[in-house]
Amino acid sequence: MGLAAVVLALATACSSATTSLGSGPTAGATPPGSGTVRDTASSSPLPQAPLTGRTTTQAASVRPVVAVALVGGAGVVGVAAGDVVYEAYPGAGQVRLTVLYQSSFPPLASTVTTTVPTDPVLLSPLRGVLASAGGSQGFLSQLAASPVVAATPQSRPHAFTLSAAGLAVSPSALVSLGKQPPPLLSWRAPGQGFAVVGARTALSVAVSLPGYPTLTFASHGGVWTSAQQPWLPAAANVIVQEVRYKTATVSSRTGLTTQIALLDGRGSCVAASGTEVVGCSWLKAGPAALTTYFDASGTPLGFAPGRTVVLLLPVGVGAGVSS
């Protein structure tokens, strides 16, 4: 898929500087957050929504995650209601979205697409449900071997609707199939910083990838939005994560292939949260492990409570931070 470039336009108080990507976590680093915020007045823990870190009710905090595989584009429906959106780039200018719902659910999400091997690796730690249009037998077998509950028009017809616009699904109709999820990220408490080292005030994050239009996120008082992809949620956090891609065979009979993101292992990233941006590194120790993001000191980043967008860019981005 070639090299991508990430350009970060930042505002700082004075001098110019450059920050490189994080060097990696330290041994024994803390995993994503505990799932509660302590009420200092009563000293009792307040439940947090596992995908957004916002305080919520106990019942809402244990609600399962429903993920939907969607084709990205101007006609996509229901993405803005997602708690977390993963954006992958299978090639030929195509965008594939995996949208995670837990704190709220849209009436419908569309256009639903097929599953790929990235899905069970991404979703297994969350013990949730994946709504997809099905897929090749090999891809479906990998999903069936994981803790993720697969929902397709064939297995759960009551949840899906077919229209002229394509296949749609009602995520709320599938929520009872999953299990209680763990917290996805390390959420920062009031007064806590985003990173121990390297964070800078940010105006925008621009991402360019050969074969795709430049994608820019602008910060508006700590909320990140994209004019090029207005269907994305207004996000408290944007993570540009470098991952390896590989060619996977969709059909041996026709020779159809696709590019899939490999999410296990470790790599470099750039993360924006609130009004700051930092070069970082990420670690996912295996299919059952969550991804943790670290600053250059090896300390887990403390993300702002709210929605998150994760861009899964091909490795070799060469990201830099300058002001």
Image (cartoon, grey):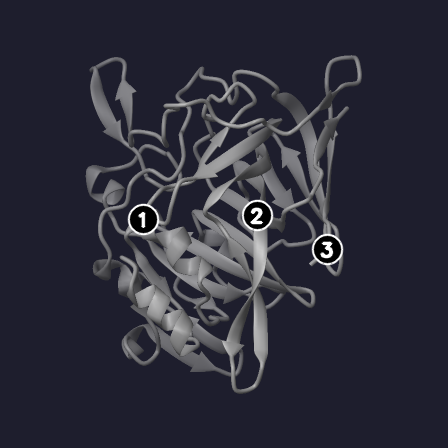
Assess whether mark 3 and mark 1 are in contact (beta carbons under 8 angstroms).
Answer: no
Between tags 1 and 3, which lies in front?
3
Tell me, yes or no, if residue 221 can be seen here: yes
Q: Secondary structure at mark 3?
A: loop
User: Can you say whether 10 is above or below 179 in the image?
Assistant: above
What percent of the width, then of the height, locates residue 38?
Answer: 27, 20
Which residue has dot 2 on it?
243
Q: Secondary structure at mark 2?
A: strand
Q: Residue at x 48, y 49 (%)?
A: 263
Within-10-Å neighbours for mark 3: few <14, some 14–19, many 20+: few
Assess whether mark 3 and mark 2 are in contact (beta carbons under 8 angstroms).
Answer: no
Q: Amino acid at mark 2?
A: Val
Instruction: Pick the residue in front: 189 or 28.
Output: 28
Q: Amino acid at mark 3?
A: Gly
User: Can you say whether 70 is above or below 190 in the image?
Assistant: below
Within-10-Å neighbours for mark 2: few <14, some 14–19, many 20+: many
Residue sticking out furthest to the bottom? 253
* Quarter of the image with the C terminus in it: top right
Q: CA distance from mark 2 to mark 1?
A: 20 Å
User: Can you say whether 162 is above or below 147 in the image?
Assistant: below
| Label at residue 158 | none
Instruction: Give the image quarter of residue 231.
Output: bottom right
Which residue has dot 1 on it?
126
